[in-house]
Image: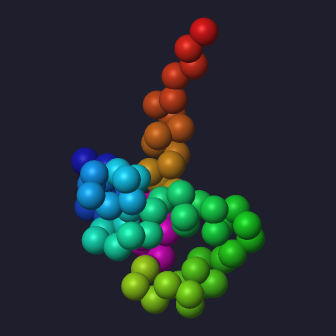
Amino acid sequence: MKKYNRIIRISASKRFGKPCIRDTRISVSDVLGWLGSGMSFEDILADYPELTKEDIRACLLFASDRERKLQVSE
């Protein structure tokens, strides 16, 4: 079992099926965007106290795993 499986959930009824953190409406892409824009873990946790460092790391692991599975079609 992947380390992020108990944190990252996909539900058709939330955010149009985007992977989200637990029962929140905060998506993996939200977190990745915040990190990419220069926010630190501490910045994110201050703005979204319902998240944990483990949640943010789970987003990174999920994205890494998805990228590894990406296939190029010609």
User: Coloring scheme of the render?
Assistant: rainbow
Compared to residue 56, the image places residue 61 above or below, namely above
Residue 30 in picture, x, y percent from top left: 55, 64
Determine if the magenta segment contains residue 56: yes
**Residue at the extreme top:** 74
**Dominant secondary structure of the residues highlighted in magenta in the image:** helix
Residue found 73% across the figure and 67% down from its top? 37
Span colored in magenta: 52-59
Q: Position of residue 22 (x, y in %)?
A: 30, 68
Identify the residue shown where x is 25% and y is 48%.
1
Give the vertical position of 68 relative to 41 (above or below). Answer: above
Please state the total of marks drawn on the protein image: 0
**In the rendered image, is residue 24 in sight?**
yes
Residue 3 in view (yes/no): no
Q: Is residue 62 above or below residue 24?
A: above
Left or right, 51 with reference to 60: left
Instruction: Name the residue located 47 percent from the left edge and 76 percent from the top edge.
Output: 53
Q: Quadrant of the C terminus?
A: top right
Q: Nearer the viewer, residue 3 or 67?
A: 67
